[in-house]
Image: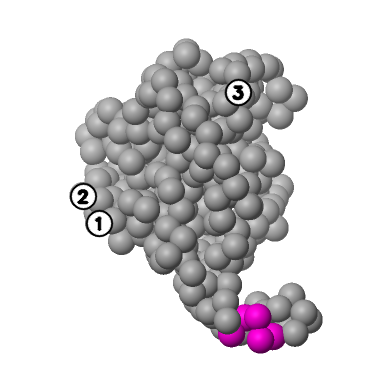
Amino acid sequence: MKKVIQQVFAHPAIIQKPPVLVDIGASGALPDQWKWIAAHSICIAFDADTRDFSISDSVDRDYKRLFSINRLVANKSSTEINFYLTKSPHCSSSLHPDNKAIAPWAFRDLFEIEKIIKMPAVDLQSAIALCGVDYIDWYKTDSQGTDLRIFNALPEEVSSRTIVAEFEPGIIDAYRGEDKLHQLMAHMDTKPFWVTNMLVKGSQRIDREDYEDLNGLQQKRLNFFLKTAPGWCEITYLNNFESANLGLREYLLGWVFSSIKGEHGFARRLARMGAAKFQDPLFDKLKALSLKNLSHGYLKLASLAGSRAIKMVFKK
């Protein structure tokens, strides 16, 4: 398998135009799944510490090139917008927390506003242009309420050619005017994508008065004895490859990304279509490998979460 993957990334179509991976809200480590393609890819990672606008360009030991951009990403560039710093840094957002709506939930205190600051913002297309690229192959964002509007602000020729799109929209009202899961799914239904994965997360529904009636140990262990209700969702889309504008490069990357996601049936379809469309013998190898993955039960193994499943799929 590893040998075939190397052949894909040694293909002239990939070498001439390396994969571009975008991570908005890249606090901490970059996605584990990118480790399989990092050495061949350009990664553009954003964080919202915008005291100084800077672009760090490095030939990282893991990535072909790694751009770290010190700027808040929004659907349009602005010299100054409000940014709400909350008790939990992971809940800070350019949207005002909806504290009234979040009041009946156990994690309400995380959204308490501690400070409002003014900061500049940049739109995604302008930002990646500064890195010398005008396309995105794998889009991942956790922007606290603005995932859809950022993606939707991309030019149609960019968004429609994106192969993987990952979002983290809300289900309940956590921010005023946020992009919700139902809005995201309705919008993406009109685009050339299909859902490959959904992971629903949440909090416990309990009023502050009832919460304070619990003792300290009960409060700390609330998630163990009180049901967690859906609050937000990590949702991943794959391009459906129904557009005639997608070329040999996109089909090769589509096969790799689909295989990483454990979608070996879809990966085999792409290899079969690629073989017929481009007459490149590499697709015959990909087609055979996808069939092997299916026949050996890798599809079931790949449904397991995390890098363990990926290692099983990509083992020698």
Depth order, front residue of 296/309: 309
Depth order, front residue of 292/170: 170
Q: Residue at x 65, y 57 (%)?
A: 306
Magenta range is 210-214
Q: Does any portion of residue 38 appear in the rendered image?
A: yes
Find residue 192 and report its horizontal and vertical position in percent: 27, 45
Mark 2 crowdedness (10 Å alpha carbons): few <14, some 14-19, many ≥20? few
Q: Nearer the viewer, mark 3 or mark 1?
A: 3
Q: Amino acid at mark 3?
A: Arg
Depth order, front residue of 285/159: 159
Q: Is residue 305 left or right of residue 139?
A: right
Predominant SS along the magenta part: helix
Residue hosting label 1: 186
Against 189, is 57 above or below? above
Colour pattern: one colour
Mark 3 crowdedness (10 Å alpha carbons): few <14, some 14-19, many ≥20? few
Q: Earlier in the sequence, mark 3 or mark 1?
A: 3
Residue hosting label 3: 51
Find residue 292 and report its horizontal and vertical position in percent: 54, 56
Find residue 99 and report its horizontal and vertical position in percent: 46, 61
Q: Amino acid at mark 1?
A: Ala
Residue hosting label 2: 190
Q: Residue at x 50, y 27 (%)?
A: 119
Mark 1 crowdedness (10 Å alpha carbons): few <14, some 14-19, many ≥20? few
Find residue 263 and report its horizontal and vertical position in percent: 47, 56
Against 31, is 126 above or below? above
Against 250, is 12 above or below? above
Q: Is residue 84 left or right of residue 35?
A: left
What distance separates the C-alpha of mark 3 from that of mark 2?
Answer: 38 Å
Q: Are marks 2 and 1 in contact (CB under 8 Å)?
A: yes
